[in-house]
Amino acid sequence: MTVAIEQKKYTPQEYLDLETDGEERHDYMDGDIVLMPGGTPNHNRIALNLAGFLNFTLKRQPYDVFIADQRLWIPQKRIYTYPDVIVVRDDIQFQEGRNDTIVNPLIIVEVLSPSTRSYDKGDKFAAYRTIPGFCEYLLIEQDIPHVEHYLKTDKNQWLFSEYDGIEASFEFGSIESSIDFSELYDKVRFE
C-alpha cells in the first residue's frame, strides 16, 4: 500500500500543521502520517471525467463536488484522507475550528490502483461507513472498465452492484443521475 514517513506518532494538530505547510499530500491514520502516491494519467482522467460530469449534472442543485485535494476527517477512526471525488449535499460541514476539512460527504469515489486497492475496499471503506450521512461509494478500476458500487439501503445495510465493459452505465442511488462508461473512461488508455 503506502509507507509511513516516520515511526513517531503524531497528534491530529501536528499532522494538520505539517500538511498545511507541506507540498505533498499525506493521509493521517490515528497517529501515523502516510505519504500518498502520485496518480497515473488514467487515474486522473477518470477522476476528472467523473467530477466534471457530476459538477455539470448537479449544477444549480444543492450539491458540491470536490476532487482529490479536498481533505476529509473521519473522527471515529481518527483518519484524515483525500478521496478522489466527494459529493456533499446541502451546506458543507467543516471539522470544528477548520475551514479546509469537510466531515459530511454523501458520495465518495476512489479510483483504484495496485498500491491502494485492498485498503480502499477494506479498512478505508469501513472507516467511511462511520460517517453519518455517507451513503454511496464507488470504486473505479483504471486499467479495465469496471466499477463496484455500494449504496446504503438502511442502517448497517449496503447494496453491492458491479458493472463491466465500456458499453456499461450505472445509476447513482443518492442523486438522480446515471453515467455511461464511454464518458467515465473517455480518453483512458487500457493496456
Image (cartoon, helix red, strand yellow):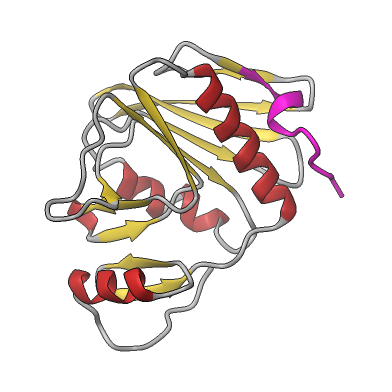
The residue lying at 33 percent from left, 19 percent from top is: 62
Question: Is 108 rendered above or below residue 15?
Answer: above
| Residue lying furthest top | 176
Res. 187 image quadrant: top right
The front one of 190 and 183 is 183
| Residue lying furthest left | 96
| Residue lying furthest bottom | 7
Q: Which residues are magenta?
A: 179-191
Q: Total number of numbered labels?
A: 0
Question: Is 112 rendered above or below residue 146?
Answer: below
The residue lying at 53 percent from left, 25 percent from top is: 54
Image location (x, y in percent) of residue 36 = 50, 67
In the image, residue 58 lies in the stretch drawn in magenta: no
The residue lying at 26 percent from left, 35 percent from top is: 92
The front one of 41 and 147 is 41
The front one of 147 and 84 is 84
Image location (x, y in percent) of residue 175 = 43, 16
Res. 32 image quadrant: bottom left
Image location (x, y in percent) of residue 97 = 12, 55
Image location (x, y in percent) of residue 130 = 24, 43
Specify whether 105 is left or right of 149: left
In the image, residue 189 lies in the stretch drawn in magenta: yes
The residue lying at 79 percent from left, 41 percent from top is: 188
Q: Quarter of the image containing the N terminus?
A: bottom right
Res. 153 image quadrant: top left
Question: Is 191 rendered above or below residue 136?
Answer: below
Specify whether 138 is left or right of 181: left
Specify whether 51 is left or right of 91: right
